[in-house]
Image (tube, helix red, strand yellow):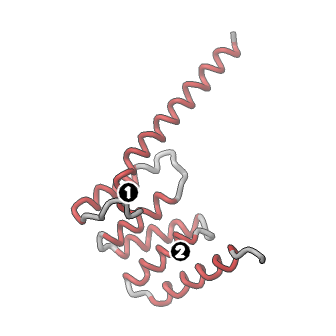
Amino acid sequence: MTGRVLLIAVCVVVTAWLAVLLRDAVVAAPGTDRAAGRVPPVRAELAPAIDGLRRARLLNPDSQLDVYRARLELAARDPAGSLRTAEQIVRREPDNVDAWLSVWAGAVGVKDRRRASQALDQVARLNRLLKLPR
């Protein structure tokens, strides 16, 4: 009897978690489609798309949502916001090349040459790490 109760409890928890992930995917879809280039980034639709990406992080640990958010913030002409978002990602994941490219783009947008150069150095470092031996 105890085994069945435990199994039912686990099933309920897993189902609830999957429901939250499905909700996150639906909320993030407009932002991911625009940031990935599948849908043109119409300026009037960028703010809701950025907000959707922010809300989609409820139980989703994927930092790609934040990378997409940084891209859309840049498209919405908010390079400082884009840079802040990208900086948060590289603090958590210093080997995330997409995040470093977003740091570079945001730094260029705010005219921070030193930070843009540092970001390109990190991209070059990661590129060297990813090269496979011949």
- Classify mark 2: helix, strand or loop: helix
Residue, x 65% and y 20% (percent of image)? 6
The disc at residue 100 is: 2
Q: Amino acid at mark 2?
A: Trp
Q: Quadrant of the N terminus?
A: top right
Give the CA distance from mark 1 to mark 2.
21 Å
Does residue 63 appear to the left or right of 4 in the view shown? left
Q: Amino acid at mark 1?
A: Asp
Residue, x 32% and y 71% (percent of image)? 75
Which corner quadrant of the image does residue 95 belong to? bottom right
Which corner quadrant of the image does residue 76 belong to? bottom left
Give the answer, above or below, for where 32 lies relative to 83: above
- Pick out the residue farthest to the front: 134
- In percent of width and height, residue 32 lies at 40, 57
Residue, x 39% and y 87% (percent of image)? 111
Q: Residues within 10 Å of mark 1 (few under 14, many from 20)?
A: some
Give the answer, above or below, for where 2 lies relative to 56: above
Does residue 119 appear to the left or right of 130 in the view shown? left
Residue, x 54% and y 54% (percent of image)? 62
- In percent of width and height, residue 130 lies at 68, 73
**Mark 1, residue position:** 33
Q: Quadrant of the C terminus?
A: bottom right
> Mark 1 or mark 2: which comes first in sequence?
1
134 or 82, which lies in front? Answer: 134
- Classify mark 1: helix, strand or loop: helix
- In percent of width and height, residue 30 lies at 34, 53
70 or 26, which lies in front? Answer: 26
Give the answer, above or below, for where 72 lies relative to 52: below
- In percent of width and height, residue 79 lies at 36, 76
